[in-house]
Amino acid sequence: MRNILLSFLLLFTATSAVLAQELTVKSFKLATSDLTAQTQPRKDLNNHNCALIKVGLGLQGVQFEGSIMGNVENKTGEYWVYMPQGNRMLKVKHTNYAPVMVTFADYGVEKVESNRTYELVVTASGGVQVEQKQKLTIRYTPSSATVLVDNKMVKGKNGVAQTTLPVGQHSFIVFCDGYDSEEGTVKLKASTPSNLQITLSKEAMATQQSIVSQPIVAQQPVSQPTVANSDNISIPVKDGISIDMVRVEAGTFTMGATAEMENPYDWEKPPHRVTLTNDYYIGKYEVTQALWQAVMGNNPSGFKGDNLPVENVSWNDCLEFISKLNRITGKTFRLPTEAEWEYAARGGNKSRGYQYSGSNNISDVAWYTDNSGSKTHSVGSKQSNELGIYDMTGNVWEWCQDGYGKYSSSSQINPIGATSDSYRVNRGGSWYGIARLCRSSCRFGITPVNRFNFIGVRLVLSE
């Protein structure tokens, strides 16, 4: 009997020691710039895209309890847990640790949303962070090329770029003017650093278009409003700066992933009929730094130049800019709705059904990752679309008025998008975006406070 009691005591002591080791939540937050939930979606029982929770915890054999869709994916150093929208809790378990219940509201997230990626960091053994990281070295030729890892620029020197990242899979793109870009994925292992050797091949034919010696300049100085014809107007602002605009006639079109759009994302679907009942004017060019400076008295852009598009401006910044612009001009400028933007990008009622705005050959109309040299370019230095509008493909993404929401298959009249203000729509692709991101139907949602050197703005004026 004494031996039995001793054995029980030892077992109880060992069990208590194991359970004394705890899992602790270090942080839980929305990963605003992580689009994995959209690019690698999983459907719930109502055929809606799930939320994705990336759980950073360097233990094997972790289990999860809650409303989880499908199998949890172990990505080496983190787990991917898909949950239907609206869920508020997730339980994290391991046989050697006391479990922890994560209540999202405790970390400022009332409930998870469809198409959003969240980061949950959990520590083990008294709060020691066990996330493992590893060094990635990319050697590239030519040495003037630009390197992006996980869509973030990695500064290189003499053809070598280095960065330290969590173990697991990461994407990379290497590109340079006059060369074919190379992109792919690399899996970092905890045991040893990873090295890549990238040698770009010269383009077989010179498809690049150099900027003309005297590019079309947006916002040319004028002393009085000029109307070349009913389809083009120029509105003076101040300091000799004016805004050129193009008329878009009302009409009906199919919005979203239409047949000519190659390899569309799920969030461009379903295609649906949209009718715009009113004519409107849209900026012939993206808002330039000269115009922004004239109105705001500052220039937040990372790439400086009067005739370059303004960037590093948030959605909220753009509303402030428009408010001041309207006071100066006495007009009622605004951001385009998403439907107005896509209709104009497609060429309105003059559309020829191109994949990009004005051509099926992206280099004709856009500055993007394969030809931009990792920077913005003067507005209007590529070909225009069917309506005479420039840079609706590439150069910088452009803010729209709408909240970002899922499409409906129903026909719509003058849609204004989702009423939520959590995310705002961006359209058009940018200087570092791949061709797939530059199609006229491609769309993304960004929080209205974020600023990036690849996001700018274009104006709309109602008749």
Image: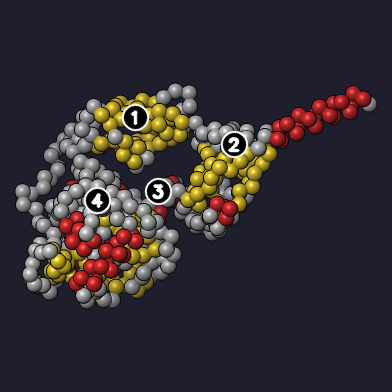
Occupied quadrant, residue 87: bottom right
Q: Which residue is mark 4?
A: 301
Q: Residue furthest toward the right?
A: 1
Residue at 34 percent of width and 49 percent of height? 263
Of badges 3 and 4, the one in the foreground is 4
Q: Quadrant of the N terminus?
A: top right
Q: Position of residue 22 (x, y in %)?
A: 65, 37
Secondary structure of residue under mark 4: loop
User: From this viewpoint, is residue 152 visible?
Assistant: yes
Report how far apart the C-alphas of labels 3 and 4 lie in the structure: 20 Å
Q: Position of residue 91 (x, y in %)?
A: 63, 46
Residue at 7 percent of width and 69 percent of height? 223
Secondary structure of residue under mark 3: loop
Report how far apart the C-alphas of labels 2 and 4 lie in the structure: 41 Å
Q: Amino acid at mark 2?
A: Gly
Q: Count the marks: how many?
A: 4
Report how far apart the C-alphas of labels 3 and 1 lie in the structure: 21 Å
Whichever of labels 3 and 2 marks the residue nearer the N terminus, that label is 3
Residue at 66 percent of width and 41 percent of height? 99
Occupied quadrant, residue 59: top right
Q: Which residue is mark 2?
A: 127
Please tell me how crowded label 2 is: few (under 14), some (14-19), or many (20+) other residues with Cα within 10 Å.
Answer: some
Q: Which mark is residue 162?
A: 1
Q: Amino acid at mark 1?
A: Gln
Whichever of labels 2 and 4 marks the residue nearer the N terminus, that label is 2
Q: Which residue is mark 3?
A: 33
Could you say which is closer to the camera, residue 153 or residue 368?
Answer: 153
Q: Amino acid at mark 4?
A: Ser
Contact, CB < 8 Å: mark 2 with mark 4? no
Please tell me how crowded label 4 is: few (under 14), some (14-19), or many (20+) other residues with Cα within 10 Å.
Answer: many
Please tell me how crowded label 3 is: few (under 14), some (14-19), or many (20+) other residues with Cα within 10 Å.
Answer: few
